[in-house]
Amino acid sequence: MMKLKLVIKYLQWIIITAIILSGITYFVSWKSPDYYTPSYTFGSERDSIIPFSYYSKIADHPRPYIITSKDKYTIFGATHTRDPNSHEIELIEKEWKKLNPTVALIEGRLGFLLPGLMNPVKYLGEGGKVKFLSEKDKIPLYNWDLPKETLAMQLLEYFNAEQIALAQILSPYFSQMRFSKPDSPEKFIEQYLKRAVFVGQENNIKEVDDIDRLWKKYFPVGEDWRAVDDQYGLPGYLEDMAGYSNDLRNKQLVSAIKELTGKGEKVFIACGSSHTACISVAF
């Protein structure tokens, strides 16, 4: 009886400790920033972007591609690095200090990170560095990108729902493949299967087998999705969709920058160098 009581007491302490540690982890760990939703409507005559379909003609641009305007903005077009010792990371800090921003924008959502225990650049790329600097200077940080739900609905004008769902589920995997192949491609994409609901495909796409089925439907020849990365283009309709998506995202980015600077904010923006090249004509 005494042993049973000790075991129960021991288990209670384990549960309490686990709850406390989980709570500490939740409150200490970084959260993905909110999306910035501009009220400004892109498309006035004074604004423009270079369509991504023309990007190959301007691809010979500086890397990183940095556009600055004193006391207004710094648009830092990175090459997407996860190397903490990269010269780009040093440049980000240098440009940050020069601008002394009041608000920052990053591309995409940030994953899980415990500050102090995990290097933000190694796990989150240049966005992690900007998050670190914004935390240090206590300024607001936003995701300038379009929410996936919004992007999915806008893509329906040119692509069918099945194509959009397949692309949005596999997109994070193709990006990850730039750096390294996940130990289990299947487990990696499982967390993104929920994106099928954005375009009403939740009954059509429930598991990895459905992804394999649809991949063979749209890409009957060529590489399996597990071997694809997005660094040098994507197969078939995926490349067209990526281009159109980038145009929508670049319009969103320009709108966000112009609205924030119009309010008197000094804005530091982190994005891929191709985005900087395509929006450069708007600045």
Image (spheres, rainbow, N blue to C red):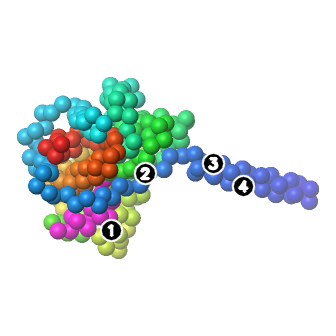
Looking at the image, which residue is at 50% across and 46% down? 30
Specify which label sits upstream in the sequence, 2 or 4: 4
Disc sitting over residue 209 in the figure: none
Verify CB contact (< 8 Å) between mark 1 and mark 4: no
Q: Residue at x 37, y 43 (%)?
A: 104
Could you tell me which residue is drawn at 15 percent across and 51 percent down? 47
Give the quarter of the figure containing the C terminus: top left
Which residue is under mark 4? 15
Residue 241 horizontal/vertical position (percent): 18, 57
**Amino acid type for the residue under numbered disc 1:** Phe
Mark 4: few/some/many CA within 10 Å (<14, 14-19, 20+): few
Label 3 or label 2, whichever lies nearer to me, is 2
Q: Which mark is residue 198?
A: 1
Q: Are marks 3 and 2 in contact (CB under 8 Å)?
A: no
Assess whether residue 252 is covered by the magenta stretch.
no
Count of numbered circles in the view: 4
Estimate the spatial distance between the alpha carbons at disc 2 and disc 1, rounded to whole Å. Answer: 21 Å
Q: Which residue is mark 2?
A: 33
Q: Quadrant of residue 85?
A: top left
> Split into 4 quadrants, where in the image is the N terminus?
bottom right
Q: Earlier in the sequence, mark 3 or mark 4?
A: 4
Going by the numbered disc 2, the residue's amino acid type is Pro
Q: CA distance from mark 2 to mark 4?
A: 31 Å
> How packed is label 1: few (under 14 Cα within 10 Å), some, or many (20 or more)?
some
Looking at the rendering, the stretch of residues picked out in magenta corresponds to: 145-157
Q: Is residue 177 visible?
A: no
Q: CA distance from mark 1 to mark 4?
A: 37 Å
Q: Which badge, 3 or 2, comes first in the chain's sequence?
A: 3
Q: Which residue is mark 3?
A: 24
